[in-house]
Image (spheres, grey):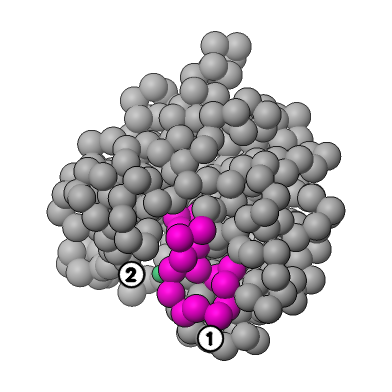
Amino acid sequence: MHILLVFCDGVGLGDDDPATNPFFHAPMKTLRALFGKIPTRADGILYGEHAILVPTDARLGVPGLPQSGTGQTTIFTGINAPAHIGEHLGPYPNDALRELLKQHSIFKQLGALGFSTAFGNAYPPFFFERLQRGKARRTATLQAAIAGDVRVRDVNHLARGEAVSGLSMNNKFWVESGASVPLITAHIAGENLMRLAQQFDFTAFEYAPTDMVGHKDNHADILGVLNEVDEFWGGIVAQMNLESDLVIITSDHGNIEDWTVKGHTLNPVPTILLGARRAEAAEKIRALTDIAPTVLDLLRDAGKFH
Ligand SMILES: [Zn+2]
């Protein structure tokens, strides 16, 4: 069994109202094909032929707007990070969150059990220079991967289709900055990521533009990012083996689903489960704290039959 966790920053379940919810204004072909409609907060758990969507609590019993540092730390450790530090905090983790990630990263836990793990994002050369000098700004997701000694992928992986850019899936920024990588579509990026995930027990990927455009109010940019991410999901679906691969798409907090507000929201986030053992996973997931334990349970269980 292969599990691919696609983390898209700042994607909540919006209202059933085109006036506030940009999902109604984008084609969202993949999402509509999976569920026959645009999922909204009013739907509860949604069942499609090959997919289940579970509304997932990101507030975690802590007052205030959910943030990326605590949300991602929760997703990638299974620990209620905002409760641990007494507040929602972001976008980057503080010392206390870094310590949680170092100790309890899902990559580290899986590695200790003998499972193979990968982190699908590609980083440019300047990032590795900053990383060496200790100056790079590292998201909680990247820190979770580093805590598990997972290789951080670079421009060479991207050129071979063995990583995906988390900032522009078509590689445009990379090509413009002189990197020798092919221009691709978001669909091909999705296929590439799924093909990578099929070589590991667990793979994660982080996509930030959904939150970045959610912080602004440029409608064309929001729709552009929704189109890109939906096409990307389509490539993942096209490449995945529904019998042996489980894809989990989730987020850390709401933002992009309401274009009448520029910041984060209190909405639940959609956790979309595709393929193998999705019904079991859907039973277990109600809040961001449930994602890492679900991945661990499913892989431990599958491991028995290897
Ligand atoms: Zn944000």
Residue under numbered circle 2:
127
Q: Nearer the viewer, residue 8 or 182?
A: 8
Report x, y in % for residue 87. 24, 55
Q: Nearer the viewer, residue 204 or 22?
A: 22
Determine whether the residue tagged by mark 2 lies in a helix, strand or loop: helix
Q: CA distance from mark 2 to mark 1?
A: 29 Å
User: What's the mark number on residue 260?
Assistant: none
> Is 291 located above or below residue 39 in the figure?
above
In the rendered image, the vertical position of residue 197 relative to residue 66, given as above or below: above
Magenta residues: mostly which secondary structure? loop
Ligand 1 image position (quadrant)? bottom left
Label disc, if present, on residue 217 of the rendered structure: 1
Q: Is residue 252 magenta?
A: yes
Quarter residue 232 falls in = bottom right
Is 272 or 65 nearer to us in this picture?
65
In the rendered image, is residue 139 in sight?
no
User: Where 248 sits versus 123, above or below?
Assistant: above
Q: Magenta residues?
A: 251-267
Residue 100 location (% of width, % of height): 23, 42
Q: Residue at x 75, y 60 (%)?
A: 38
| Circle 1 residues within 10 Å: few <14, some 14–19, many ≥20 | some
Q: Is residue 92 left or right of residue 24?
A: left
**Rendered image quadrant of residue 152:** bottom left
Q: Residue at x 84, y 53 (%)?
A: 36
Classify the position of the N terminus by image quarter.
Answer: top right
- What amino acid is at disc 1? Asp
